[in-house]
Image (cartoon, coloured by chain):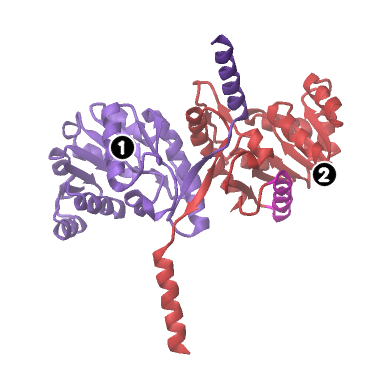
Chain colours: A red, B purple
Amino acid sequence: MKIAVLGTGEVGRTLATRLAGLGHQVTIGSRTADNAQAAEWAAANGGAHGTFATAAAGAELVLNATAGEHALAALTAAGAQNLDGKTVIDVSNWLDFSAGFPPKVVVPDEGSLVEHLQAAFPGARFVKTLNTVNIKVMVSPQEVPGRHAIFVSADDAGAKAQAVELLRSFGWTDEQITDLGGLATARGTETYLNLWLLLYGKIGHGSFNISLVEGAVQGSAEAAVESATESTVEA
Amino acid sequence: MKIAVLGTGEVGRTLATRLAGLGHQVTIGSRTADNAQAAEWAAANGGAHGTFATAAAGAELVLNATAGEHALAALTAAGAQNLDGKTVIDVSNWLDFSAGFPPKVVVPDEGSLVEHLQAAFPGARFVKTLNTVNIKVMVSPQEVPGRHAIFVSADDAGAKAQAVELLRSFGWTDEQITDLGGLATARGTETYLNLWLLLYGKIGHGSFNISLVEGAVQGSAEAAVESATESTVEA
């Protein structure tokens, strides 16, 4: 598949490398056509590079891997006409480092960064995912053992299915992939970054994730028993 | 120990019952002296009840179990002179339900509700903990299997130690108790509620929690090997 990865930082380059390794035709997009990191990446990985607009224009699928505070500008440079009808997977987080570490998650008026982007580009089909783990875990979930979770938020069912397919190709299992619902649920995963950053500071590295652990619910079990009893009585 | 539990809702009553069961002298505090739920709780559990001020005045330890939006008013009614020098464990969350479910976490100017309360009552020693799980899990962590996490944030080391002792008495193990650092780290656990609420909606009950899962860090292992090698060479 022809995929545009917007952003030439560590996140963008690692995603692009993983996708190229999976056989996709990847173009890494940046602000300028002559970005040295993008050119180096393309030469080393058999990919292409270009402006945000060039990358998006030729792509069937777009990943936004820019820093969250630059995401709107990057997508604006990519051009609405180059995003219309396409799935745009937003892995970015908008962090304000002005008061030092840990930075603070910026919450736009729409409730989350990805809703802010969706409002600006109504023709694109946004998905939020992969923003709750570090880049190594994003593309190689087996870096962390066990049933840890990756969250997906999207309004468009087709776009969500495409994102889930991408997650599976990275090695995420259906047990790990946690569909939270519509795009507004990204408010939960984006603000979770506040906790992630503290855990990152405490643990000392980014090779970790959270796992959901459920307890037994006595109430439900009793309700099920009652229900079964009623059925028996009725029968 | 003489403990005041402020708030007569399900959280307050369940905490008060658990504490009374552990042998503490518990007074449950409410807005008015004649609160029916508080009187009923006291009669059933061998505890006492009274106004926020009465409860706080006689207590060595104070737990704030009011709804977050009423916490400042409740502590104001309790009175600064009745909180000064005492550990105040804040388990509350400030949620705005005005736009339906899921509600939105309200973040005061100070960055978190507990910092907002600390600023209003500088003589009290605030701790934030237990706000990331439902009330059953709070007092009975074994409701959820495995090594799931409970977070603690506090500036005062003595107050934090007292809160950790309380957690242990509820059954939380040292492996589960995760000290995030100063009171400002409550920004991470309070905003995590946005994700908790979505998971609650998805799972359908509150008997769950998150567990931290760490991966091996190759970089560190290599560094350790190098360091060991260097030591060998030096020796």
Q: Within the magenta stretch, is there residue A170?
A: yes
Find residue B106 and report its image quarter: top left
Residue at figure coordinates x 59%, y 27% from the top left = B221
What span is in magenta? A156-171
Q: Amino acid at mark 1?
A: Val
Amino acid type, callout 2: Glu
Q: Residue at x 77, y 34 (%)?
A: A16
Instruction: From this view, report whether residue B66 is shown above or below residue A31.
Output: below
Task: Specify the farthest residue to the top.
Answer: B234
Residue A111: say if magenta. no
Q: Does any portion of residue A52 appear in the rendered image?
A: no
In the displayed structure image, the side of residue A180 where residue B111 appears, left or right:
left
- Classify 10 Å Cα crowding around label 1: few (below 14), some (14-19), many (20 and above): many
Residue position for label 2: A60
Chain where mark 2 sits: A
Left of A75 or right of it: where is B144? left
Depth order, front residue of A164/B149: B149
For the point 80% across and 38% down, the residue is A21
Residue located beneath label 1 in the image? B164
Q: In which quadrant is the N terminus of chain A drawn?
A: top right
Q: Position of residue A182 (x, y in %)?
A: 61, 52
Answer yes or no: is residue B219 visible. Answer: yes
